Image: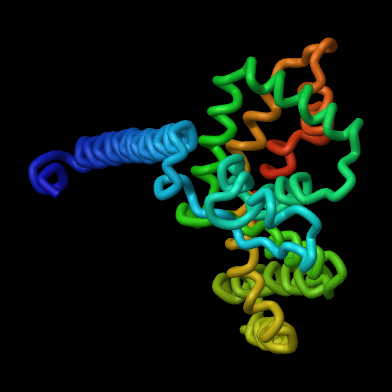
Amino acid sequence: YLGFQLLTLLLAWLVALLALGCFVVVTRRHSRVIEQVARIEAFCRLLEAHLARLELDWEAIPPPAPLNVPNGHPFAADLDLTGSRSLHQLLDTSTALGGSRRLAEWLLAPVPDLQAVLRRQNLVREMVNRPALRTSLELDGRLANPEPAGRWDTGELLAWLERRTHGTSFRPLLDWLVILALANIVLFSLNAFGVLPPLWGISMAVYLALQALRFRESSEVFDEAYDLARQLGRLRDVLSGIERIPPDPAARLPAICAPLQAPGQRPSVALRRIGWIVS
């Protein structure tokens, strides 16, 4: 304001642009500080939970996830495998509800698959020798969880994707609306320059009528698209960490991560494409 009052117009605009640039820089740095503070706080909670497990401080260990244990299970109750103060609660460091339930399935298997158990034990031995990777993945998972007090139920997201995959496509409607929008712009511009009468009113009426035909269905698209991008965005750091695991022919863990590291299947590429689609 002072620049436009006291300086020439050119200098005033330079001052305004400089102030805007400084504001953008400070805002970005401030956002990074907030992210680092949130990461440090999550890391402190992570360490507190691990210390509680070491000391068997059950009150400080995160509560167990809700599970459906079959009635009459031969040994679940006798061995305290699930529920409060159970082996499952002690071992379960998962962020997603699906991961917690998978761990419970392994513990409750009446006849375990020996080869599968041995493969998992070998993977665990490799993860033990990678404390930085293990901690980083767990920390990214905690930050991705929208419910810090519980576990993220990704089943809702998968159900939405499955429902939308087999649902009605809005692409034909979108194509026609784009064509009509361009026609509106052209006709309005020609009318503004006195070349044509106000024919844009007709194309605009057709545009609004076509949009009204599917308004009830299409009005939810924006909220659903935004929610989808928000939920998948939480996985970006977790999946990026898996992408960065270096290849090692002698190790089993990189072989499991290989599908997510293939050039055409990297999660980061897919998430960027989803971002463009949402936009």
Q: Position of residue 13 (x, y in %)?
A: 26, 41
**Farthest residue in the front direction?**
78
Q: Position of residue 139 (x, y in %)?
A: 51, 35
Q: How is the image coloured?
A: rainbow
Is 180 in front, or is 50?
A: 50
User: In the image, is residue 141 above or below residue 132?
Assistant: below
Q: Position of residue 188 (x, y in %)?
A: 61, 74
Quadrant containing the C terminus in the rendered view = bottom right
In terms of image quadrants, where is residue 170?
Answer: bottom right
Residue drawn where x is 74% and y is 42% of the image: 270
User: In the image, is residue 102 above or below residue 158?
Assistant: above
Can residue 218 be seen in the rendering of this structure?
yes
Q: Relative to 175, is 91 on the left or the right?
A: left
Can residue 279 be seen in the rendering of this structure?
no
Residue drawn where x is 55% and y is 73% of the image: 192
Is 188 in front, or is 15?
A: 15
Q: Relative to 48, is 1 on the left or the right?
A: left
Is 248 in front, or is 211?
A: 248
Report the number of numbered marks.
0
User: In the image, is residue 248 above or below residue 2?
Assistant: above
Residue drawn where x is 16% and y is 47% of the image: 4
Q: Position of residue 255 (x, y in %)?
A: 83, 23
User: In the image, is residue 201 above or below residue 263?
Assistant: below
Residue drawn where x is 31% and y is 38% of the image: 30
Q: Relative to 149, is 179 on the left or the right?
A: right
Is 18 in front, or is 157?
A: 157
